[in-house]
Image (cartoon, grey):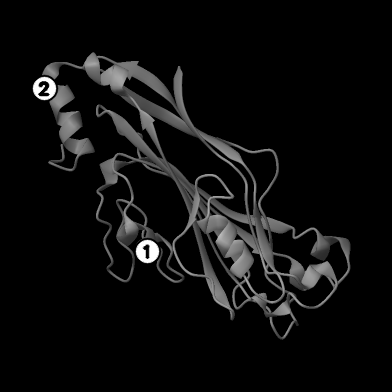
Amino acid sequence: MEQISASTQLCRVDAQAGSFDAAENLINNGAYTGWELHNALGAIPTQVMLYNKQTISLQGLVAGEQQFISASLRVEQAEPLRCNMGMNKDANAAPYGFVREYHLFTTEELNDDDLTQIFNLTNPTLPGMVTTAGTASRLNENQLIYGIAREYNSIMNMASPGSTFSEDWRVVPSFENVLGNGYPVAQSLVHYTRLIYCWMNPTTATTTPSSTVQGLDVPAARASLIGVIDKPNFQEYLATLANNEAIGSW
């Protein structure tokens, strides 16, 4: 078995002096390598839309008219994601107490419109999918090689300020789903995107204890496609290329 991988470094967003400005400046100025914000962070309850894009070269396979066939997806990280969205009875708590995380391997780079569709509160639209609201992705199902969707929920409403659970920003995994069909890749690049979506309210940041300071702590991770290298016949190779580029579908 072979594998192709992409690694993301840590990223942190927290409110300082009642504002996310400092955190936003750190991200926008490259303090957290590879991470970018899809939206501007507000001074009131705001969505947090973080993403990290990378490309993986398969140029050596292309030269030999070979293709990579994925069999599984693996995500490795040393610790769980952590987030503080405010106490359940906090007048300034975030309006929603969940965090969504996606690891996506695609044959095309996700553009701003694709990101906007995924960073959606009620109807997130992933590559190759159509939501119940009728919103369709620009990419087809064969262009999502593999991915994983996760959701975490806050347990802040189970703890009082100053307790261990509230101060370590612990969140509980509540959903995980593997995406994609492992369609072969014959083109020269695979695109990887890691996305984080949640809501936070910075107005509690001027109070103590630290459990009321809202923020997000994203750990470093390595995502890998596990599969085999195959040498198809020329007609099959062209069909795979066409599917990768959404020219046709077989």
Residue located at (48% from left, 69% from top):
40
Q: Earlier in the sequence, mark 1 or mark 2?
A: 1
* Residue 190 visible at all: yes
125 sits left or right of 222 in the view: left
Q: With respect to residue 6, does 141 lie above or below?
A: below
Q: Are marks 1 and 2 in contact (CB under 8 Å)?
A: no
Q: Residues within 10 Å of mark 1 (few under 14, many from 20)?
A: some
- What residue sits right under mark 2 in the picture? 235
The amino acid type found where label 2 is placed reads Gln
Q: With respect to residue 127, does 221 lie above or below?
A: above
Q: With respect to residue 164, does 9 lie above or below?
A: above
> Dividing the picture into quarters, in which one does residue 238 lie?
top left
Residue located at (15% from left, 36% from top):
250
- Measured as percent of width and height from the top left, residue 222 is found at 56, 35
- Measured as percent of width and height from the top left, residue 24 is found at 56, 63
Residue located at (74% from left, 82% from top):
90
* Residue 178 visible at all: no
> Dividing the picture into quarters, in which one does residue 46 lie?
bottom right
192 sits left or right of 188 in the view: right
- What residue sits right under mark 1 in the picture? 116
The amino acid type found where label 1 is placed reads Thr
Task: Give the farthest residue toward the right.
Answer: 163
Q: Nearer the viewer, residue 31 or 229?
A: 31
Secondary element at tag 2:
helix
